[in-house]
Amino acid sequence: MAEFPRIRARCGTNTIVWSKLLIAVNALKSARYRWTDWQEHMGLQFALTMYLVAKRDPRTREVLMDNDGPGLHTDPFAWIILLNAKAKLASNPKDKIFALYGVFQELEIPLPAPDYRKDVVDVYREAVIAAIKYDKGLDILYYVPSDHRMADLPSWVPDWSDPGWPEGDARSSRDYGFAAGGRGKSKWRFTDNDKKLVISGKLIDTVIFRTEPLTATNASEAPRQPDVLDCKTQHDADTVSELHTRAYKIFRSWLEVSLWSEAYPAEGTTKNAFRQTVTLGGRMANQNVLADYFFKEWYRMLQVPEADHMDAFVDKLIPGRWRPVRLFRKLLTATLKMTVQSSARIVAALGEAAVFHGWAIACCTNKCFFLTENARFGVAPDPSPVPVEAGDRIAVLGGMAQPFLLRPVEGGYRILAHVYVHGIMDGEAWPEDEADVEEIVLV
């Protein structure tokens, strides 16, 4: 850190040595300080500081290499720097790239020199090409979709002027340990004056039907694991209740579509496939006996008509077959049906199943459920700049952890988003014979 005392951050009349500010921010992050989003505001500064310190001070690099852990990289990734710059503001959208030129030069990452005569589409495309060539990987493709991307961009180029989906959004890419495209490295090349990206992969299926999405009305409505009991105010309780109610109705429609298939082709039953799909392979729902019980209750409640919710709730509350008990249950049920709102009835009827319901919501908010030609189930980002439609193709791309949704267009395919498709997430669909791998042209 020897060179950093000369770098200071200023806010009004206050100044602080940059290295001390970084230490303070890390301390707030460790304490889970909630005043602001650390990753959004300080991710770029943290990544650049770490890379530059490792570059300038060999001793620091040695220490970092000896203590290398998950998420710690002393060698820079161009795509990570570009991604962290996405949320920053710039009066000229080209400056989202040009402002990084000096840093990229010091980190020895090739990047075309700033040229304001170029169109912003060319500036963004050239930055992505430079990042892919330097990083020797295609992780940058996970960040292509965003809600307000420019229409003229090649489909494989992220819009660096659009902040994109935040980390807490269920649509954003996360590392769940998938390996849909095998465990090897990605292979690609650029064609047509670098206007197209050609990737080694395999087209394996076609979407034939998509459902209504489970859409959140605002970003704070869908926490990682919604819980009807985790409410500090009546407003919180009403919001969570409304979300659970809307999700219940959406999941019922998804279940109906899943039942169109009598047997799932990959493994097990359609019931198990549906469970795995709405929890992304169980990555967010613990696979244990308790989770099995919660799922069975949830699956059963999805098939209970809404008019019978109060009956189901009262039956759980007051079990027994003795005639006076049955009469009391009947009277209580009739009273509750007249006095309790529909949303509250659904939450009450879910009971213990609300635990699994929360897991499914956390995985599927802002996503739709779809069915493929080969009877596979999947979930895709929705709302999305280009929502999934019947006829879209499912592809596994070499070395990429998640499958991608592609739309056939003139000259190739338009990449839409990464998706979850049950039964192919661990390389089951990746060709064993290299001769079966094909070139997929992204335009």
Image (tube, rainbow, N blue to C red):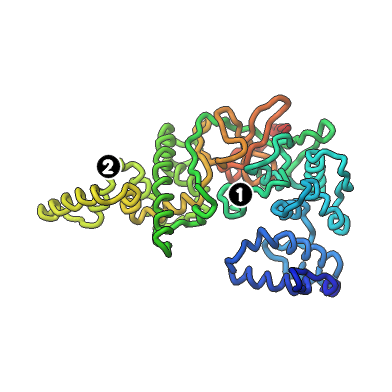
**Left or right placement of residue 284 versus residue 347 in this view:** right
Q: Quadrant of residue 403?
A: top right
Disc 2 residue type (three-letter)? Ala
Mark yes or no: residue 289 visible.
Answer: no
Report x, y in % for residue 119: 82, 38
Residue depicted at x 26% and y 44%: 308
**Left or right placement of residue 101 versus residue 11 in this view:** right
Q: In this picture, is 285 found above or below 23?
A: above
Report x, y in % for residue 219: 54, 52
**Left or right placement of residue 85 versus residue 112 in this view:** left
Report x, y in % for residue 261: 43, 33
User: Which residue is at the front of the view, 204 or 82?
Assistant: 82
Question: Circle 1 sits on which residue?
Answer: 172
User: Which residue is at the front of the view, 241 or 436?
Assistant: 241
Residue depicted at x 62% and y 38%: 385
Question: Circle 2 sits on which residue?
Answer: 307
Report x, y in % for residue 99: 82, 53
